[in-house]
Image: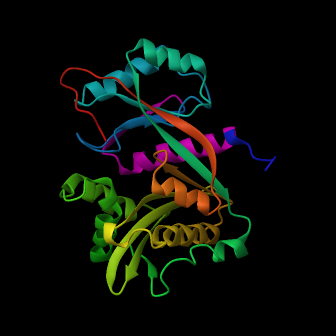
Amino acid sequence: MNDVNLVEIARRFERKQAETVVALATESAPLADGWMVFGGVGSYVNKSCGYGHGREVTGAELDALVEFFSSRGVEPKAEISPFVPVTLLHALAERGFVLREFETVLYRPLRDVEALRKLGQGAPPELVIKRVDPSDDAAVRTFAEVSGSGFVPEGEKMSDLFLSLGMKGARTPGTDAFVAWLDGVPVGAGGCESSEGLTTLFGTSVLPAYRRRGIQQALIAARLARGVERGSDLAAIMSAPGIPTERNAMRLGFLMAYCRAVLVKHGAGLAPSP
């Protein structure tokens, strides 16, 4: 697709990431053209993101980033796209930030509605995917438990903080939460958020006993269809490199947009964040 502008996709996605975590956070503050966000020790929303695309980030602002997180007892974290200025990377390195991991961002145009309807047809015919009513506490809790199950070690109990964030996310305006049911059992779940023509997919998990049956692909397809209903022209999904989420997304027509870097600054007494 010669008309694809990956820099613009990054601008849209990174801005959306920042807006999403701000909505989930207990504390936040602007950072240049992005945000720094805190949701409690051990929260996955503890991060800074969305900056480096609209204007230069000053040294004073990066010092404020370090202070924002350090003063709250957690490691400062910066999530950036490869399209930020190299000077920003140098400035972060000078302040002791090191690379922790990479995350891939994939995109898919939502122009061909007919093709979207054919996605996910490899799932069991008896599979039912239901959109969650955000006013139904039990349904929202089921979504959060199943959606989050793939992000905690198997056999471990999900923390109350993680569960509460999942429930809060399902009720955020613009968000749709879906649960996949098979024979009356909730076997998978995933959410999406749509605004400004972009639908981002997040929080997809399938219970171990039901994997490799096309359920994750069916959940992706359901959310793409919802994105079209909400007027989006583009869908995006973020994944760790090489995991099933990335592979399933690519099977359904997603393409690699870019790889983002997660940088952290270690320090004595500072707790790491997921």
Q: Residue furthest right?
A: 2
Q: Residue furthest top?
A: 94
- Boundaries of the magenta span: 7-32
Q: Is residue 92 above or below residue 239?
A: above
Q: Position of residue 90 (x, y in %)?
A: 51, 15
Q: Nearer the viewer, residue 182 or 148?
A: 182
Q: Is residue 240 left or right of residue 7?
A: left
Q: Is residue 70 visible?
A: yes
The reply to whether the magenta stretch includes residue 25 is yes
Count of marks overlaid on the render = 0
Of all residues, the one furthest to the front in this rendering is: 212
| Residue 138 drawn at (x, y percent) | 27, 76
Residue for point 56% across, 59% down: 249
SS majority, magenta: helix
Measured along the vertical axis of the image, is residue 267 above or below residue 94? below
Whether residue 135 appears in this view of the structure is no
Q: Quadrant of the C terminus?
A: top left
Answer above or below: position of 77 versus 167. Answer: above
Splitting the image into 4 quarters, where does residue 211 fall? bottom left
Q: Residue at x 25, y 53 (%)?
A: 153
Q: Nearer the viewer, residue 48 or 108?
A: 108
Image coordinates for residue 186, horizontal then vertical, percent: 33, 77
Q: Say whether residue 123 is left or right of residue 163.
A: right
Residue 260, image x and y in percent?
52, 36
Relative to 96, does residue 68 appear above or below in the rendering?
below
Which residue is depicted at the point 57% across and 28% down? 52
- The colour scheme used here is rainbow
- Residue 172 occupies which quadrant of the picture? bottom left
Image point (27%, 25%), residue name: 70
Q: Is residue 226 magenta?
A: no
